[in-house]
Image (cartoon, rainbow, N blue to C red):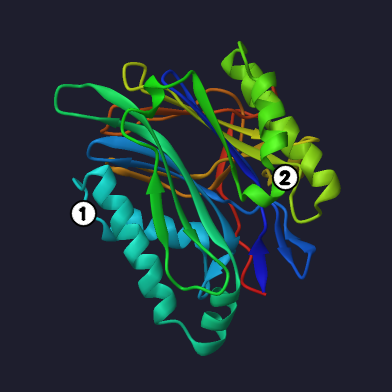
């Protein structure tokens, strides 16, 4: 059984939301897919979310992020509001596993599954608020719990920091990390959080050192930054007319925006922008190769073992 015993660290304030997760999938505690995608960017009728998960890597024969993206992008009506979309996702996850095969259900029941969700929600007047939510299924259970911070949580303090699952980043470590993030810039905070995941990967083999970072700016800025943060440069073979050359690349998550569905991709070259019919633009960071005009390709997915 392949599992995502991963680590997701999420930073949330009234000004910015940052979600960083590692990308390693393991099988029997050994690496299986170091480049697996665990993140989905989803635009609802009244908000935008970054969703990352830990738990089983596949739902049936489908990678879990593909399953989540397929449900949100194709089965949830396009003008569904954010809260309703999340409740529908919770119900669909429970339904999928209650109707799974006996073997899949046994694996599912015995494992942990959690999602970490951060985003922005706005009302018809254009007033926006940051939201923090989660779905969790405890080992030995098939039922999900859906929770979220109170509506005006951000008025009670400067920011919140969350670890998913908490067992990989205990409260004491979380407090130490929170102190490091005080009075930092967005880029500095992102680097500090990614470095914290890298430190955990040294002692927890199921957590990988290479991270995906999603930064959600508020609706008045309408910007999402996506960065792949590896410990060393990733590369891929690119075929040309008469040769194959290896170039530095980055990776992107699922992007579900109004009028646009973009699967996890491999990209190289600067200046990638993803526009849609909605208010947000997604900016994808990638290494620049002066000899290559640009590369954008769907990312190969590992089949279930």
Residue 23 visible in rendering = no
Residue for badge 1: 77
At numbered mark 2, what does the secondary structure look like: helix, strand or loop? Answer: strand
What residue lies at 31% left-to-right and 16% top-to-bottom? 220
Residue 269 position in % (x across, y down):
61, 28
Image position of 279 with respect to 71: above or below: above
The image quarter containing residue 140 is bottom right
Residue for badge 2: 236
Q: How many marks?
A: 2
Q: Quadrant of the N terminus?
A: bottom right
In depth, the one of 250 and 159 nearer the eye is: 159
In depth, the one of 223 and 166 nearer the eye is: 166
| Marks 1, 2: nearer the viewer | 1
Looking at the image, the residue that sits furthest to the left is 124
What residue lies at 38% left-to-right and 27% top-to-bottom? 281
Residue 68 position in % (x across, y down):
42, 58
Separation of disc 1 and disc 2 at Cα?
Answer: 37 Å
Looking at the image, the residue that sits furthest to the bottom is 102
Q: Quadrant of the C terminus?
A: bottom right
Image position of 186 with respect to 206: above or below: above
In depth, the one of 304 and 145 nearer the eye is: 145
At numbered mark 1, what does the secondary structure look like: helix, strand or loop? Answer: loop
Circle 2 packing at 10 Å, graded few (<14), some (14-19), many (20+), is: some
The disc placed on residue 27 is none
Task: Tell me if 289 is positioned left or right of 269 in this view.
Answer: right
Residue 209 position in % (x across, y down):
76, 42
Task: Tell me if 157 is positioned left or right of 299 in this view.
Answer: left
- Which comes sooner in the sequence, label 1 or label 2? 1
Circle 1 packing at 10 Å, graded few (<14), some (14-19), many (20+), is: few
Residue 235 visible in rendering = yes
What residue lies at 50% left-to-right and 73% top-to-bottom? 141
């Amino acid at each position: 059984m392949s599992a995502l015993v991963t680590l997701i660290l999420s930073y949330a304030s009234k000004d910015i939301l940052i979600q960083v997760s590692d990308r390693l999938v393991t099988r029997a505690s050994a690496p299986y897919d170091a480049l697996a995608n665990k993140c989905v960017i989803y635009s609802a009728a009244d908000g935008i979310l970054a969703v990352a998960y830990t738990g089983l890597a596949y739902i049936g024969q489908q990678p879990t992020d593909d399953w989540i993206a397929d449900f949100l992008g194709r089965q949830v009506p396009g003008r569904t509001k954010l809260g309703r979309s999340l409740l529908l996702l919770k119900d669909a996850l429970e339904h999928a596993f209650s109707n799974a095969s006996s073997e899949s259900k046994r694996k599912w029941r015995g494992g942990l599954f959690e999602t970490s969700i951060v985003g922005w929600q706005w009302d018809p007047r254009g007033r926006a608020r940051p939201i923090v939510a989660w779905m969790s299924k405890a080992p030995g259970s098939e039922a999900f719990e859906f929770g979220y911070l109170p509506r005006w949580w951000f008025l009670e303090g400067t920011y919140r920091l969350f670890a998913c699952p908490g067992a990989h980043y205990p409260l004491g470590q979380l407090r130490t990390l929170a102190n490091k993030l005080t009075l930092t810039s967005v880029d500095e905070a992102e680097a500090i959080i990614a470095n914290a995941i890298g430190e955990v990967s040294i002692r927890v083999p199921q957590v990988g050192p290479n991270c995906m970072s999603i930064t959600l700016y508020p609706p008045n800025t309408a910007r999402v930054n996506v960065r792949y943060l590896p410990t060393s440069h990733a590369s891929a073979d690119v075929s040309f007319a008469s040769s194959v050359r290896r170039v530095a690349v980055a990776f992107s998550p699922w992007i579900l925006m109004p009028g646009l569905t973009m699967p996890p991709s491999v990209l190289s070259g600067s200046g990638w922008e993803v526009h849609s019919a909605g208010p947000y633009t997604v900016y994808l960071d990638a290494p620049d190769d002066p000899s290559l005009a640009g590369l954008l390709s769907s990312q190969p997915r590992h089949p279930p073992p």
